[in-house]
Image (cartoon, rainbow, N blue to C red):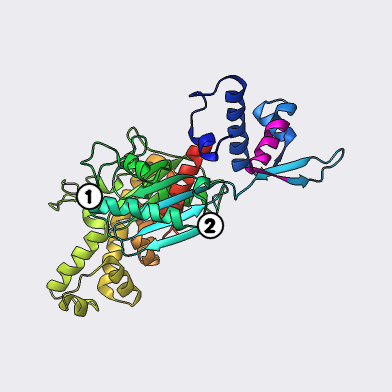
Amino acid sequence: MASLTEFFNNEPNEKLKGVTHKNIAIKRNIIAYMAINGECSHSELTKELHISVPTITKLVQELIDENIVVDLGKVETPGGRRPNVFGLANSAIYFVGVNVGRDNMTYVVTDLQNNIIKEVTDNSFELQDRTQCLEKICSNIEEFVDTCGIDRSKILGVGVSIVGRVNPETGRSYAYFTSSEESLRDIIQERIKIRVLLENDTRARCYAEYNCSRSKVVNDLIYLHLGRGVAIGIVIDGKLYYGKNGFAGEFGHIPFFDNETICACGKKGCLETEVSGIAIEEKMVKMIKSGVNTILRDKFDRGEQIHINDIIAAARNDDNLSIELIEEVGEKLGKAVAFLINIFNPETIIVGGNLAAAGDYIMLPLKASTNKYSLNLVYRDTKFRQSKMSENACAWGVAMLIHNKIIGL
């Protein structure tokens, strides 16, 4: 085998034929099986992959020689001979996940078992739809890959998540850097010379939430992201749901309200116009101008921008106006979430994003309103929980996705 990159990223039928082609395919299946099931013996691989014992024994040994698989020694059995068990060598292969946020970039390196080896956050970055920003993104990723402490030849893929609509199949972003004939994925890939997967940030975080869920038996999950906008990620039967073109999850742009407020999408009355972080910020400023008392008045009078995080902090400091605005959002949002529950009947709804940090101020009215407007038979078995993941969730999720795509899961 020439290299790990060639082994995983080249299509086997491009240059290789016959036995060599078949053996590479079997090796990939062995690695995929171990990635999902962990340690296993020759007999388990033979049974699950329907390959003869001599062939499995030969190919596992080749993977050991290539430092992809390790022999973990013998395991106790009820009787008879003790078989050797084998597992993946975590230090053989790595993946990089990058989240391009509005005001930061987050990077992680993960091993074959999706463990985070290194993580870095750059808070000096600001996302802008300009050529200079695209150059900055490429150079930042390139620099991280070169300085993360992992041999570049062992990094098989880089997952990149970004805000806005994304089609992972074509690698195109429909919110940023759309003027080029090349897709954003191809531009980054050509620059860093490593295989790239482009993904939407909410979907990437949803996948991280799903994989790190306390209950590993959850197969159907909705991740509700409450940031400056509103979006959802959907897992059905253990798989991310994309829709036809990868745009599933535009929950915030449902025409939910009969108002004249123009949404960022250009339409009126979208859910985002009243339940997003931006909507709360605008309402707070409007209320301050009308004379309503709040501890954020001094900040406003100084000419400083009021951010949703300021409003959450004020609520925690018993500011009545902030509490009322957040609770109002929870009530309105719950009515919309009731539609999701009635349609998808999910096992779990996880609430994340800036607004989730408001805790019970958002969660209690959200759940009460959802209960009020959804069908009891459908709602009663749905569990709500607040996200506990850190800011690296998007980068971690997209690292898992490029891992799965390359390994073949």
Q: State the extent of the magenta-drawn residues as a range.
A: 57-71
Q: For residue 298, which quarter of the picture?
A: bottom left
Residue 168 drawn in magenta: no
Residue at 58%, 37% (x, y): give it: 32
**Side of 268 relative to 102 (left or right):** left
Residue density around tag 1, few if under 14, some if 14–19, many if 20 or more, within 10 Å? few
Residue that extends furthest to the front in the rendered view of this protein:
2
Residue 148 position within the rendered picture, expressed as x and y whole percent measured from the top left: 47, 57
Point out the image quarter for the N terminus.
top right
Q: Which of these two is toward me, 30 or 351?
A: 30
Residue at 52%, 36% (x, y): give it: 8
Residue 369 visible within the image: yes
Main SS of the magenta part reads helix
SS type, badge 1: helix
Residue 244 position within the rendered picture, expressed as x and y whole percent measured from the top left: 34, 32
Residue for badge 1: 131
Residue 270 position within the rendered picture, expressed as x and y whole percent measured from the top left: 21, 48
**Side of 6 relative to 53 (left or right):** left
Q: Which of these two is toward me, 135 or 177?
A: 135
Q: Amino acid at mark 2?
A: Ile
**Side of 389 relative to 161 (left or right):** right
Q: Nearer the viewer, mark 2 or mark 1?
A: 1
Q: Earlier in the sequence, mark 2 or mark 1?
A: 2
Residue that extends furthest to the top in the rendered view of this protein:
18
Residue 178 position within the rendered picture, expressed as x and y whole percent measured from the top left: 23, 42
Residue 60 drawn in magenta: yes
Residue at 46%, 52% (x, y): give it: 396
Spatial CA span between label 2 and label 1:
32 Å
Looking at the image, how many numbered discs can be counted on the residues? 2
Residue for badge 2: 117
